[in-house]
Structure formats: C-alpha cells, structure tokens
C-alpha cells in the first residue's frame, strides 16, 4: 500500500495492493493486465499484417467467384470479362491505398473515416461513416466466416448440413482469442496468415509455370450445380459489367482497417502502419489478378458445391493431394481469421464513437486484457444473428456487404480533401489544434487534395453502382439500416448532451443547506433487523416515523404490541390495506408526506433488509427497497436507504 501526500491538498492518492484473483475468466482469457502494460501490447509490421490485413487478403477466396456469378447471366462465354474487371479492381485498390496512406500520417491516433469526417465535414457525416463502418465490420465477420465454412464443405461435403453450427463455433472461437488481447491474437493468427500466403503463391507460381509450359489443363469434372444469377440468358451489357465489378469490389473492403487501428502499432506508429498498408496492397492486388486470370484460363465455374479456389487448386496441383488439402486448409483458416480484422477494428471504432457520445459509454471501457471487451462481445452476437438469418450463405450476404464500406471510403476521402484545402489556407509554420490531429500548412496541399478528391469521386461512383445493381438483392437493407443507425446515434448523443448540461457546474448555485430530515422506517414486523434499522435511523434525525402496512390483522396486532415494548417511544403509523396491497397504500402515504414537506426538508426512507448467508435464499424474501427505488427514483428530495442485517 502506498499513499502520496499531495502537499496539503485535500486530494490524497492511494495505491492498492489488490491483485485480481484466479477464476474461470483467467482460465479462458489469461491473467489480467495492468494499465502500465498497455505500451507492451502494441504490435509491429509482421503481426500487424496478420491482425489488420487478413480480411483484405482473404477476399481473393470469394471476390473472383462473385464476379463470375454475375457474369453467368450472359453465359460462360462472358467469363473472360472477369480479367479486365479484376484489373479495374486493382486500379481502384491503388487509388484507395494512395489516399489512406495520407490519412494514416495525418491522423496518427487512428479513427479512420469517423475522425476524418468529424474534424473536416461535420457531425452528421461522421455518424454516417461510423454507421457504415460498424455495419461493414459486422458483415465482415458473417461473410468471412461463412466463406471459410464454404471452403471446408467443398472438401468435406458431408458437413454441408452443419455449416451454421460450424460458423457459430468459429465466431465464438475468434471472440475468445481476441478477448485475450491484441498482441496475443496477432501471434495466434500470424502463422496461419503466412501459411495462407505461401499456399496461394505456390498455386499462382505453379499455375503460371504450367500455363507457360503448356501443361495446365482445364478443370476436371467441374461442378454441375452452377450458380446462375438469372434464369434466362442476357446479353452482355454495361449494366451487367458494372454489377460484376460491384461484386468484385468486396476484395477492397478491408483497406480502411489499418487506418482505424493505428494505435495498435509500435512507434513510429504512422510509419509502421503505412508500410503495412502498402505491403497488404501489393499482396492483395497480385493475388486478386493472378487468381482471376488463372481461374479464367482453366475454366472454373461458380458453384455452391465447390468453390473457385478448390477447383483452381486441384487443377493446378493435379488432384486432391497433400498440397491441395493444404491450400483448402489455409484458405478456410484465413477466411475464418478474416473476421479478426473486424474484431480488431469494431471495438476500437465503437469506443471512439462512444467517447464522442454516439454510443453507450460502456464501450469505452477496457477489459482485463486491455481490449474493449464489450465491443468484442457485441460484434460476436450480431454476427451470429446474421449467420443464422442468412443460413451462412456467402452469396446471400455479399449484396449487403460493400455499400457501407464504400460510403465510408467516400466520406473519408472527401474529408481528407477538405483537410488539405484547410491546410493550404494556413501560413507556413502556423498550426491549428483539432480534436483528432494538428493541422499544419502543407506545401503539397494541392496535389494531396486532388488525390483524395479523385478517390472520393471514384469510391462514390462505385458506391452508387453497388447500391443500384445490388439493391433488390439485399443492398436495400443496408440503405435503410445506416440512416436508422444515424438516428439512434443522434438520440444517444442528445441524451448525453442533455445529461452533461443538467450536471454541469457552470452557473451552479448551491441550494440551501438541508434544515430538517424526516425519516420513515418501514416495519413489516418487529425483530432484530427492525431494531438494527431503527438504531441507524436515529443517527439521521429524531423525527422518525415507523410505518406498517396492515394486511393481516393478527400480524398487525403482534407488531403493535412488540413496537410498544421495543420502539423506544417513536410513533408507529399503521396503514390499513383492505385489499391486501402493500406498495400502493405505502406510496399514497409517502405522497402525502411529500406534499406537506417544508422548504429545505428531505425525506429519508429506511428499509430493513435481510441478507441471507446463502444467496440462493434471496428469492424467499421480498425486496421492498428495490421496488420503492424503482417508483421513487424520479422524485426529488426523497432518499431510500437499505440497512442490511445478515442472517443464516
């Protein structure tokens, strides 16, 4: 124990020797970490790639297939368009990386679109960005887990009927790993992430070598249950191409994750986060194009029975040998782990939004392992609900997926463009302190503004394309959900603002001192607990009135007789209750006392409370104080106090 003398101040700092004990929580998530351990929980580029990039990298397992599903409306002859569409997606990725690299260095404390919008555009765009991203993170978990289970059922079709249960198990597993802390989850996921990269590049390299050598054939026995987006063949139209492009853009939905989680990186945070972002982009772009190109070359087919990756791997690797099984295992694991990106960012973003008063403040509290535990659990619950509702189907979940994230992309890039415009208005050396960062004059502000402005235009166009082409397929849900969340955010913020105003000490005039205290002692019968409560009541005031509600005349007579002997001369008011009600007659009496209350007088209600040694026996006793508290808490100048009396 340590106490610091504050040099005569009325504030005394006291250190505690208490250490959290062992229990089931410690067994599941590890020993509690002190606040001083926070700097040691940060991660470098190696672990950062595993924690924040698994969502983006894993998307190569389903994004090319989603492109083919849309193109199937024009028949298999349209599948060759998947390659130029993949190139377009890679170009979009480059634009986003260019833009977010600037965001990382401008906002080293993280927060992504929400912080950028709040500081540069306004509160409403910030709320829209938060709603869009939080929705996207929930969908990320549902989509990636469902896609991972699809890979598993491709190799083991017997598991098809259990895919929802398997998906829920994976969500709970990742939740438990993340509750153990950022650093520990990063170390847990690092090996599978790099194993996935090794297996993907093995397939890509072998595939291109065999293609150049002329030994790469077509998919043997392609699946027959082709997913066709339309019942009748359509011509190849610009609308169809744009719809396929929109489906493929799910490959870039994890790009913002690093800018949201900069604070998880070691110093220099911005440099490490920026480098990780560029590495992720190079990996994602090369895999997206290569897998799409090779898949088109060998004639893969979109199927619920067998995924594109499975078809490509068994064609490139000549069957279902050990390398094929390794590829399927790696893909399944990375898809499940892709949910970890959302688990890393959803709690951080919700904590930032909660700190600004847009979500419940409880989301800002860190758990025993220095992670935002409540946010992690909330994300798990909502993702499980989606998996159950949509039966763990990737195709049914995908249309909900990218509208929100491209909306946040657009808001973020627009905010950054305005930031550079504001920077250009400052003089060299001049600084402006904003809530999320420090704004300085930047000599390259015009170039940066053009880059972010162009990114905003491109992502806005993609968002509109996605919303229009996927609207009837399910995107309408997100289009309605995001404004609904913004309304909820505004209501929560209004509540906190009103509360802060009511509690503010600005222009506060202390009320007159309480001149008198009227004590009401509730008496059900006279016993040791009653006398113990009377003993306490006498320390408050000499104006004590015992109150008994008469339900049983025999018990009331016993109470009157005992009070005459043990009541120490204090008055006892007996309220007759002919309908055997307790609370209502009592409240009527309290209302009368309150109505006749004098100025600067307070009413204190003292309630004797049994505290059984065994908690389970609590159900055998009436909790009068709890009931009174619920109905009287809204009344001024009424205080309810429980006086516990421990019994066996």
Image (spheres, grey):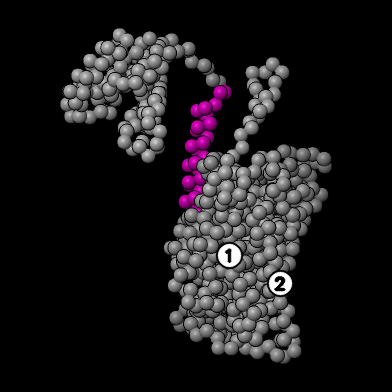
Q: Earlier in the sequence, mark 2 or mark 1?
A: 2
**Residue shown at 70%/21% (left/top)?**
5
**Residue shown at 57%/58% (left/top)?**
174
Image coordinates of residue 554 in percent, x first then y, are 17, 23
Image coordinates of residue 559 in percent, x first then y, are 24, 19
Image coordinates of residue 560 in percent, x first then y, are 23, 16
Task: Determine whether 149 is above or below 561 in the image.
Answer: below
Q: Nearer the viewer, residue 86 or 551?
A: 551
Secondary structure character of the magenta stretch overall: helix
Task: Say left or right for 457 vs 146.
Answer: right
How many labels, in total?
2
Question: Spatial distance from mark 2 to mark 1, Cα to Cα?
Answer: 17 Å
Point out which mark residue 198 bears: 2
Based on the displayed image, in which of its 4 quarters is residue 540 positioned?
A: top left
**To which residue does mark 1 refer?**
336
Task: Determine whether 197 is above or below 497 in the image.
Answer: below
Point out which mark residue 298 bears: none
Q: Quadrant of the N terminus?
A: top right
- Magenta segment boundaries in residue numbering: 482-506
Based on the displayed image, in which of its 4 quarters is residue 551 positioned?
A: top left
């Amino acid at each position: 124990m340590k106490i610091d003398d504050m040099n005569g101040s009325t504030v005394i700092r006291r250190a505690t020797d208490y250490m959290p004990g062992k229990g089931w929580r410690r067994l599941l998530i590890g020993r509690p970490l002190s606040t001083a351990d926070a700097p040691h929980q940060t991660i470098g580029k190696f672990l950062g790639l595993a924690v924040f990039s698994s969502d983006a990298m894993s998307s190569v397992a389903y994004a090319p297939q989603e492109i083919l599903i849309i193109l199937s409306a024009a028949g298999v002859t349209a599948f060759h368009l998947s390659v130029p569409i993949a190139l377009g997606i890679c170009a979009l990725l480059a634009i986003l990386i260019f833009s977010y690299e600037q965001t990382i260095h401008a906002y080293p404390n993280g927060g992504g679109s929400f912080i950028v919008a709040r500081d540069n555009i306004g509160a409403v765009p910030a709320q829209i960005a938060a709603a869009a991203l939080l929705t996207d993170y929930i969908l990320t978990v549902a989509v990636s887990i469902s896609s991972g289970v699809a890979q598993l059922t491709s190799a083991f079709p017997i598991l098809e009927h259990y895919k929802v249960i398997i998906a829920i198990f994976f969500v709970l597993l990742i939740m438990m790993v993340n509750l153990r802390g950022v650093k520990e989850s990063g170390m847990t996921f690092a090996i599978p992430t790099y194993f996935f990269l090794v297996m993907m590049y093995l397939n890509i390299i072998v595939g291109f070598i065999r293609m150049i050598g002329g030994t790469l054939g077509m998919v043997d026995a392609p699946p027959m249950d082709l997913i066709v987006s339309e019942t009748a063949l359509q011509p190849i139209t610009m609308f169809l191409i744009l719809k396929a492009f929109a489906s493929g853009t799910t490959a870039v939905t994890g790009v913002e994750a690093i800018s949201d989680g900069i604070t998880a990186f070691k110093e220099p945070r911005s440099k490490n986060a920026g480098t990780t972002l560029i590495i992720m982009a190079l990996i994602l772009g090369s895999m997206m194009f290569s897998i799409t190109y090779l898949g088109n070359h060998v004639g893969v087919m979109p199927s619920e029975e067998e995924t594109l990756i499975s078809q490509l791997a068994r064609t490139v690797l000549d069957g279902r040998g050990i390398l094929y099984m390794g590829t399927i295992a790696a893909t399944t694991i990375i898809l499940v782990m892709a949910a970890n990106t959302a688990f890393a960012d959803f709690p951080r973003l919700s904590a930032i939004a909660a700190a600004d008063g847009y979500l419940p403040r409880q989301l800002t509290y860190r758990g025993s392992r220095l992670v935002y535990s409540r946010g992690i659990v909330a994300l798990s619950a909502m993702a499980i609900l989606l998996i159950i509702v949509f039966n763990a189907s990737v195709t049914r979940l995908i249309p909900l997926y990218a509208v929100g994230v491209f909306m946040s992309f657009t808001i973020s890039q627009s905010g950054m463009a305005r930031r550079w415009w504001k920077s250009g208005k400052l003089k060299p050396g001049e600084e402006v302190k904003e809530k999320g960062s420090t704004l300085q004059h930047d000599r390259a502000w015009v170039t940066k503004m053009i880059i972010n402005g162009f990114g905003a235009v491109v992502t806005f166009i993609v968002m509109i394309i996605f919303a229009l082409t996927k609207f009837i397929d399910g995107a309408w849900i997100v289009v309605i959900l995001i404004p609904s969340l913004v309304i909820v955010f505004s209501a929560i913020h209004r509540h906190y603002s009103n509360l802060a105003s009511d509690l503010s000490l600005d222009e506060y005039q202390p009320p007159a001192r309480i001149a008198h205290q009227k004590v009401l002692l509730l008496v059900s019968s006279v016993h040791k607990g009653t006398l113990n409560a009377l003993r306490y009541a006498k320390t408050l005031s000499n104006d004590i009135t015992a109150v008994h509600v008469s339900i049983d005349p025999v018990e009331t007579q016993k109470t009157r007789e005992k009070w005459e002997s043990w009541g120490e001369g204090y008055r006892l008011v007996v309220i007759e209750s002919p309908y055997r009600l307790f609370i209502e007659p009592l409240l009527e009496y309290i209302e009368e006392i309150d109505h006749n209350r004098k100025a600067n007088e307070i009413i204190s209600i003292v309630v004797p409370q049994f505290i059984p040694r065994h908690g389970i026996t609590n159900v055998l006793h009436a909790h009068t104080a709890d009931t009174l508290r619920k109905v009287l808490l809204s009344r001024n100048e009424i205080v309810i106090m429980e006086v516990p009396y421990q019994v066996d």
